[in-house]
Image (cartoon, grey):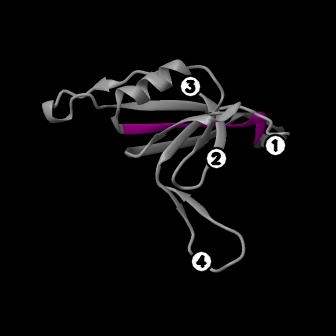
Amino acid sequence: MPILTSQTTNPGSTVALAAFFLNLASDSTDFVAFEYVTQTQPQTSTGLSVRAMANNRRRAVRTGGVDMSASWSLDKVTPAQVAWLEAHVGETMCVRDDVGRKWFGVYSSVQPDEDLYPDRRGEGKFTLNLQQVSHSQAV
């Protein structure tokens, strides 16, 4: 699998992923990797309300914590990768992408779009939507 390590002489090491990885949060050896990501759409949001204060002033008041969700458009997805995703719907995943983000999330559905080109039969594309969840990595 494409994992690139830094060749610098600085102390420590750097790992750059050349793919989008999902693994079970409870078992890091149970994973799937997608090399062909055509689009990533991360979104960070929070519960927020605007309240009127004295003197006609308005103030933003947070009503919740910060939530992160993201969607990835994946291409050239094999039937084995789709089967892995379908087998793990609703489970907590460790998400790692090629720009260095690592977080824990869950997805509730897998809906691949079948690719109709005869030269690429058996491969498809779809969008995977994940919602961030809390997960402890305590040993």
Residue bearing the label numbered 4: 8
Q: Is residue 102 left or right of residue 65?
A: left
37, above or below 129, in the image = below
Q: How far is disc 1 from disc 3 in space, using C-alphas?
A: 45 Å
Q: Residue at x 47, y 31 (%)?
A: 128
Q: Label 3 amino acid? A: Tyr
Q: Is residue 70 left or right of residue 104?
A: left
Q: How far is disc 4 from disc 1 in space, using C-alphas?
A: 59 Å
For residue 107, the mark is 3
Label whose residue precedes the other's in the sequence (3 or 2) = 2
Query: Can residue 71 be seen at all in this image of the molecule?
Result: yes
Label whose residue precedes the other's in the sequence (4 or 3) = 4
Classify residue 77 by image quadrant: top left
Label whose residue precedes the other's in the sequence (2 or 1) = 1
Magenta stretch holds residue 60: yes
Q: How far is disc 3 from disc 2 in space, using C-alphas?
A: 16 Å
Classify residue 117 by image quadrant: top left
For residue 102, the mark is 2
Residue bearing the label numbered 1: 55
Magenta span covers which residues?
59-74
122, above or below 71, in the image = above
